[in-house]
Amino acid sequence: MVVTVKVSKVTKTFRKGKTPVEVLKGVDLVIERGACMGILGPSGTGKTTLMRIIAGLEVPTSGDVYFDDKLVSTSNRIVVPPERRNIGMVFQSWALYPNMKAYDNIAFAVKNRKGEELRKKIEEIAEVLDIKKVLDRYPRELSGGQQQRVALARALAKDPSLLVLDEPFSNLDARIRDSARALVKKVQKEFGVTAIVVSHDPADIFSVADVAGVLLDGNFAQVGSPIELYDSPVSARVARLVGEINELDGQVEGGKLKVLNGTVEVKGLDEGEVKVGMRPEDLKVSEDQVPGMVSLGKVRVKVSSYTGSSFRLVVSPIEDDRVELYVNSDRPMDINSIALLYVRPEKVKIFRK
Ligand SMILES: Nc1ncnc2c1ncn2[C@@H]1O[C@H](COP(=O)(O)OP(=O)(O)OP(=O)(O)O)[C@@H](O)[C@H]1O
């Protein structure tokens, strides 16, 4: 039975020698039945700890965890042990048994089915994951992508209440990572299982999660759809974690934002010093006027490099060489050429200092 997961005011304190360190500081979270929640955050921020608490592998210092209405963990106590939470887990390492064929690796995890019924279930999942032909191979005879799919099949074969994926793509080549992400999304939806994906790579989270949370300093700094997090981050730290961003100082005066040599209309903001964020794809360098975009003044091109699908420019305002901005461009530019820098005004992000 697929569950809704509810985490309520969960804290976790570890001891580093004699010093207590509070890693989670009252985390609240609801993952609706059948939804896929992504958890993003820098290293050491408590992502794995939170996931282990949900899985029952770690006990919360305080707070509660529910699967539907059932209390599974509470302050310093595991109410339902991990083996009875029916969680399908996929780890970064995939953790396949090297001495067992793919089929047996999958079958080993399934306790509730036997014989023909088990075989049918495994074949059905193998079909969806396209690993039917490799079920009689040992892990060492499989590619990384196939091993990952076997690990996913193993997690799904027991009809889990919850699927937990811990950095599931980090051991894959960049070449197949995109297709692996698409496959995870497809099977998660097809099997209708509630899922949690933990990663430090926003691309992992954005490609599979319906809702994502950014964990910073022991709490969620923001929870929202991937688009919300990317387009409307609540802070410069969140903005930086979910994608590349240029950060500049600006000033709000009389309903206008002054940044570099440009002015952008803004509404409902307090006057004063602000931090301004602009993503490289929201900037453009051009000799001509660009309709719908606002000029930020003249810049000098310092770097123009080809990235495979587009060009990447590094530019500096002509009056201040120390300020550098990254700009995505559909064409190369001559080094040291001077042009105007434009920004899409609706995409400018403004943060309090
Ligand atoms: N069993 C433990 N005892 C003491 N400290 C721990 C223990 N487990 C984790 N920590 C500490 O808690 C903090 C959070 O660790 P956690 O592994 O949850 O972070 P993370 O966000 O998953 O990091 P990463 O992305 O590097 O895996 C770290 O500072 C870590 O050193």
Image: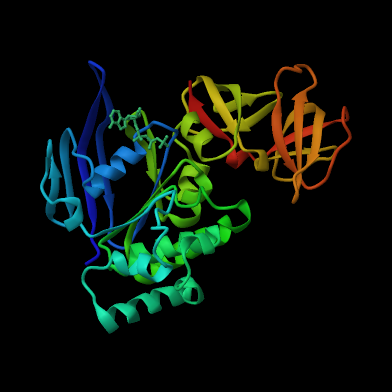
Q: Residue at x 34, y 40 (%)?
A: 48
Looking at the figure, which quarter contains the N terminus? bottom left
Residue 55: image location, x then y, percent:
25, 49
Q: Residue at x 50, y 45 (%)?
A: 202
Q: In the rendered view, does 71 fall on the left or right side of 204?
A: left
Which sits in the foreground, 190 or 310? 190
* Quadrant in which residue 216 is drawn: top left
Residue nearest the observer in this picture, 123 or 12: 123
Residue occupying the far bottom of the picture? 116
Task: Please state which of residues 300 and 348 is positioned toward the viewer in this rendering.
Answer: 300
Q: How many marks?
A: 0
Placement of 143 over or under 52, stated as above or below: below
Left or right of residue 239, residue 309 in this image: right
309 left or right of 125 in image: right
Q: Nearer the viewer, residue 220 or 121?
A: 121
How far from the left and from the top, in percent, is residue 252? 55, 23
Vertical relation: 300 (above or below) 320: below
The residue sitting at 18% across, 39% down in the picture is 59
Rendered-image quarter of ligand 1: top left
Residue at image location 44% in from the left, 49% down from the top:
93
Question: Which colour assignment does the render follow?
Answer: rainbow
Q: Is residue 247 above or below residue 122?
A: above
Horizontal side of 124 relative to 174 (left or right) equals left
Residue 116 to residue 331: above or below: below
Q: Residue furthest front?
A: 99
